[in-house]
Amino acid sequence: MDNKLNSDSISGPKNREFESNKSKIKKNNTSNAGKLAFYIGSLHKGGAERVFVNLAEYFLHQGYQVVMVTQYQKEDEYVPADGIGRVISDITPQETTESRILNFYRRLRKLHRIWKQEQPDLVLSCVGKNNFMTVVTTMFTRTKAVVSVVGEAKEEYPTRLMRTLANLLFPHAAGVILQTERSRAFFSKRVGKTAVILPNSLNPLFIRPRFQGDREKRIVSVGRLDENKNHEMMIRAFANLIAKYPEYTLTIYGEGELREYLQELILVLKLEEKVFLPGIIPDVAEKIEKAALFLLTSYSEGVSNALIEAMALGLPVIATDVPSGGTVELVRHGENGWIIPVGDAAALEEAMDRILSDSELADRLGKEAYKIQERLAPERVNAQWKAYFEACMKK
């Protein structure tokens, strides 16, 4: 919640800016296809946020009016295309009290007012409590609610109470979108029976011909530097292989709270000339497309966009079998990538050794991984989302 910015839902400078955006929407959308809202915590640069921004822009180009409703605003955010409105839904400091219950009620009431004012035909929400709030606040309005679970279901709904609420509220939504079959099994049969599985589309920046030359002696990873990504296991496995593969380096792109810890680990293992943490960069595709191997060592993921993008570039990949089933939705072990158990350092080291030592295997895995470009092409996946939204709006 850092850099938190509050505003009234229908007044003040931020909403004057929204009114200006709204006028652009009217000019850009003459087909009267309808109006959609996307509700998420913020547009801070991350996987779910990027998916929402990409979907919003797709629907804008399809003739829909589109508004992004976020709880708050952060400094480092994706910038939606011109014509997409923005409303901040959180209560202001003046509206905040010492009572958590009262504050929650005021947030619900404010969000309900936003739907009444904006009158979207459909609102898509994601992540834990946001889905609850969307279902509750759209009741008795003309707006259809579609909830989505983009991460590990057990982490989004970790307690018995939250799981019970999900199973009670989700059937009242017009639609439920999941990303894996394992997520379907987490919820009640009533929810699972009606839910659909829709993939995320591939970021267009990663659609390009597969690199055909000699690959650089580089192992790469992309992800936030936090405990969940388990970069420590990656670095230690690489350290154990460096004597056998002295010409290779490991580069981890991303930023996060474990930077200092990982930098210290690199120093302790005397890998300063071999392991690099360049931070967040804008041109990831260009930086990794010639690499020899991509690693994903997370304890938990939904369906990893970073893994999708590495595969789309035609890199051989090693990824952990995360509990959500996100990895097995993408990777067929030994065919288009390599799957290892979560937290298994020995399995990671063995897999890295096998692929680095066998150029034919690495090339075969990369060629098969590259085919995900067709499977998750934006025009194909976005059309599936559009068809589902239109069906939900008719309910």
Image: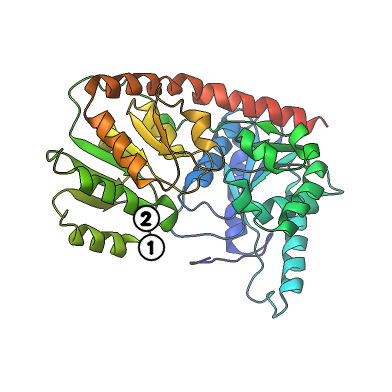
Q: Label 1 belongs to which residue?
A: 257
Q: What residue lies at 49% left-to-right and 60% top-to-bottom? A: 74
Q: Where residue 144 sits: x, y (%)?
A: 78, 40
Callout 1 touching callout 2 (CB < 8 Å): yes
Q: Earlier in the sequence, mark 1 or mark 2?
A: 2
Q: Where residue 279 sits: x, y (%)?
A: 30, 53
Among all residues in the image, which is located at the extreme front? 346
| Residue 333 marker | none
Amino acid type of the residue that numbered disc 1 sits on in the rendered structure: Glu
Would residue 330 appear left or right of 165 to someone viewing this image? left
State the quadrant of the C terminus: top right
- State the SS at label 1: loop
Q: Label 2 belongs to which residue?
A: 225
Q: What residue lies at 24% left-to-right and 45% top-to-bottom? A: 238
Q: Nearer the viewer, residue 257 or 331?
A: 331
**Pointer 1 local density, CA inside 10 Å: few below 14, some 14–19, many at least 20:** few
Q: Is residue 76 visible?
A: no
Q: Where residue 101 sits: x, y (%)?
A: 76, 72
Q: What residue lies at 39% left-to-right and 47% top-to-bottom? A: 223
